[in-house]
Amino acid sequence: MQRRLMLLDSASLYFRAFYGVPDRRATPDALPNNAIRGFLDMIATLVTDHAPTELVACWDNDWRPAFRVEAIPSYKTHRMVEGTDGVEESPENLTPQVPVIVDVLAAIGLTRLGIDGYEADDVIGTLTVGAHGRAQVDVVTGDRDLFQLVDDQQSVRVLYTAKGGVRAPDVVDEAYLERKYAVGSGAAYADMAVLRGDSSDGLPGVAGIGEKTAATLIGRYGYLAALRAAIDSGDPALKGAQRTRLEAAGDYLDAAPRVVEVVKDIPLPADFSAALPTEIADPGVLQRLTEEHDLTTPVARVLKALQLD
């Protein structure tokens, strides 16, 4: 049987669940549970529809790693709580639900992995590369940043949930990248993203270089390093305002790849395993959490999908 590894960009999914699932607490003083319920329902749907043999809920142990801030100080600054040193803004009713998600995953026996000093994207990148040649990989996310991992030869694709959610995600492979962005590989997408920038992450990009122009440049030169070599060598195809802008962005282009490119070689815990559970890890704790947070239906759905019911 072919091994199929599913990697969840957890924060992307539970934020979507929080905003997409109604808050229907039994009493106003009860802990909100819409993100918990929605996240568990997503896992149940994904396992049922795609039948992974391994699954990891990848976690942001550091949502704004020091190495990225050092490279581009504006990285995610707009998401920080004002007056704090690196605290991420989060909806008041979502924050207390995240520890419950952690506890429920542990009680079921589903693997969750975060590494101090790194984002979930870096965990996903490391696990993806580690699976090359041994498993098909599905990365589940609502974030385009992870398109850079798409690799048909290594059977890596992204299930992109931004529009259709987990029930009808866009399946992002190299043909999708070519069709949508006019770049033919995940690596080319990353280079295009450096040029284009991303205001949602505080990345300015090269002034005057939008997505289409960025894709054209990467399409012409193949990758960012070749484009930069062409700039330095005086390639006559680069001229006028475009050349001026690219030359002026030299410092940014030196730093931005360290922010955009996911890390692919994080040391993993010695006892790490992505295997699906063959039995409920802690039935007593799972029962308590289910009762305390009114999770009967979503927990039952997950257990059924995992064939643990």
Image (cartoon, rainbow, N blue to C red):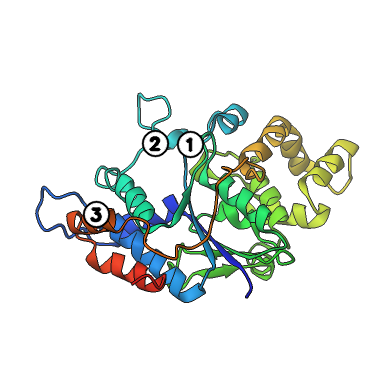
Residue mark closest to the camera, 2 vs 1 = 1
Label 3 – label 1 distance at C-alpha: 26 Å
Which part of the image, by quadrant, shows the C terminus? bottom left
The front one of 127 and 280 is: 280
Label 2 – label 3 distance at C-alpha: 26 Å
Callout 3: helix, strand or loop? helix
Residue pointed to by mark 3:
289
Residue pointed to by mark 2:
88
Is 233 rendered above or below residue 174? above
How many numbered circles are shown?
3
Q: Would you say 251 lies left or right of 159 here? A: right
The front one of 237 and 122 is: 122
Could you tell me the amino acid type at mark 1?
Answer: Asp
Kindly identify which numbered label has been placed on residue 62: 1
Could you tell me the amino acid type at mark 2?
Answer: Glu
Asked whether disc 3 touches disc 1, contact meaning CB atoms under 8 Å apart, the reply is no
Find residue 99 and report its horizontal and vertical position in percent.
32, 45
Residue mark closest to the camera, 3 vs 1 = 3
Find residue 294 and report its horizontal and vertical position in percent.
19, 60
Is 250 rendered above or below residue 109? above
Q: Tell which circle, 3 or 1, labels the residue nearer the N-terminal end.
A: 1
Q: Tell which circle, 2 or 1, labels the residue nearer the N-terminal end.
A: 1
Residue 239 in view of the camera: no
Asked whether disc 2 touches disc 1, contact meaning CB atoms under 8 Å apart, the reply is no
